[in-house]
Amino acid sequence: MRKIRQIYVVMAVFIFSLFVIQTFAFATSASSGDTQYAEAEQFETKAYYQKALELYKAARSQYLKTGSAVKTQMCRDKIFKMTAILIEFPLSEEQAMAKLNEVFEGFSAEEKKALIGKLKGERLIIDGNPRYFEQFTSNILFRHPELRKRLPKIYEHYNVIAKKYGDIIFRQPDNTYMLKQWNSYINPQTYIADVKVDIPRKELPEKGIYRLWIPAPILLDSQRDVRVISIEPQKYLKRTPQLDYDIGSAYFEIPLDTVKEDIHISMKYSFTHYEQYFTVDPGNVGEYDRTSELYRHYTSSSDNIIVNPEIKRKALEMVGNEKNPYLQAKRIYYEVVNKYRYSYMPHLYLYETLKPESLFVLENGYGDCGSQSMLFAALCRSIGIPARAIGGMLLTPGSPSTHFWAEFYIPNYGWIPVDPTIDEVVLYSDELAEGERKKVHEYFFGHLDNRRMVIQKDADIPVEPREREKSIFNTTLQIPKAECETMEDLPIIPALKGYDITIETQY
């Protein structure tokens, strides 16, 4: 009996020792993870993003050992943030200079030095060294259009795109049909889209749920007869596109532990988009119902359409003593077109560093289609004009692309479209006479071509069902979104690599 007790005592001591060792190991791992996380935050604050990325990864490894789900997820969010910033600014000084020399062939060393010295926002000091935005050379040309004449191939490219809208803007309208106040939606055009997402099985983890949102068109006055023709495979589909929702998407869940083969998802849909041609009498503009949900929603601030004193001061400066909301919006539109140059934007960097896009454009004097539209909407909202940034695709013949434009609301007429970006793009053509240039401005304020697909009614609208993780960029849904808690790398990368959309015009 005494021997049995002794054995129990020895076993108890052994088990206790194991517990102490294990507890010590867990505590050591947690402590080590906390230290590495704190160090990573310090490096992040100093813009040493690569070093911070390495430390966040190391901290995550320690937290995985302790089973700390919250801290593990915190590290994962930070890892994605550092990765996104580094993706946006991939070029070293040497690589940037090589690209500059390639694009601006024939320019002197002094000219190229001056060009790179004028950059605003495309050059950051990361890990102690200058890093450059991938599309910085394009932005130089956007902001200095006179340089394009010295680059024949680039010059002709811009002229070709500009000319593609001439048949719409400069055509002779049918006065019996087009210019009626009651007929603001004309010239319907039907499209059929084929969407595919192909992901090799090896690019996804063995276990977990891969959640995927694929953009789809929604119903608007300008976009009708939306029809989903097919979605395959049905077994992954969890939510069909909600056509009357504020944002359109098909939602899929892929249980990876049951998937052995490559993943092939397809969707086919059709829609009809109308040209918008509003004929507005400023004297017929009614009074806003400031108690309505529409007014309250579209005059308030959002993540990227910021309404603050700085924005309001600029809007009041633009409109001067004008009180009519339609004419106020027109003045704001002309100011945005003439003073805020089109340029590609480091969206991921702005999102991850919490810089609102509309405010960035206001402060830096340039932006792309999305940020120009968000600035227009912010300026309108700040003085009591409901406005929004519309997201989707521009279906330019031969070169479809993702796109944003804007709308503002006036009583007795509804939502009035504007597109400052395409206005500016058409003006790239130096072959336009002064009268034609004026007509371009006039067309894209209150009128809009039918080469569009609307996916979301405004910026900053969340997808449904809501994302469970922090998105890499949640302002828009023009391309797929994805998340997967078991993935080490950005879940969106495999989906983007395998994403393809073909849109055909139906006659």
Image: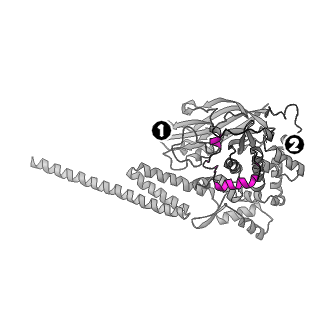
Label 2 belongs to which residue? 170
Is residue 61 toward the left or the right of residue 254 in the image?
A: left
Residue 343 appears anywhere in the view: no
- Label 2: few (<14), some or many (≥20) within 10 Å? few
Residue at 71% over, 38% down: 453
Q: Is residue 216 visible?
A: yes
* Front-most of residues 441 and 129: 441
Query: Label 1: which residue?
Result: 257
- Which residue is situated farthest in the left direction here? 1
* Magenta stretch holds residue 148: no
In the rendering, which numbered label is found on residue 32?
Answer: none
**377 displayed left or right of 86:** right
Q: Residue at x 67, y 47 (%)?
A: 381
Q: Earlier in the sequence, mark 2 or mark 1?
A: 2
Amino acid type, mark 2: Phe
On the image, which quarter does residue 34 sit in? bottom left
Per the image, label 2 sits on a secondary structure element best described as loop
Residue 299 covered by magenta stretch: yes
Mark 2 to mark 1: distance in Å?
58 Å
Q: Hey, which residue is sitting farthest bottom in the picture?
A: 110
Q: Amino acid at mark 1?
A: Asp
Mark 1 closeness class: few <14, some 14–19, many ≥20 residues within 10 Å = few
Percent across and percent down for residue 158 are 81, 51
Find the magenta span and give its range.
295-322
Horizontal and vertical percent for residue 9? 17, 51
Q: Residue at x 64, y 49 (%)?
A: 305
- Left or right relative to 306: residue 320: right
Q: Is residue 395 left or right of residue 47?
A: right
Spot occupied by residue 28 in the image (x, y as percentages of width and height): 36, 59
Judged from the image, the secondary structure of the residue bearing numbered disc 1 is: helix
Based on the displayed image, in which of its 4 quarters is residue 239 positioned?
top right
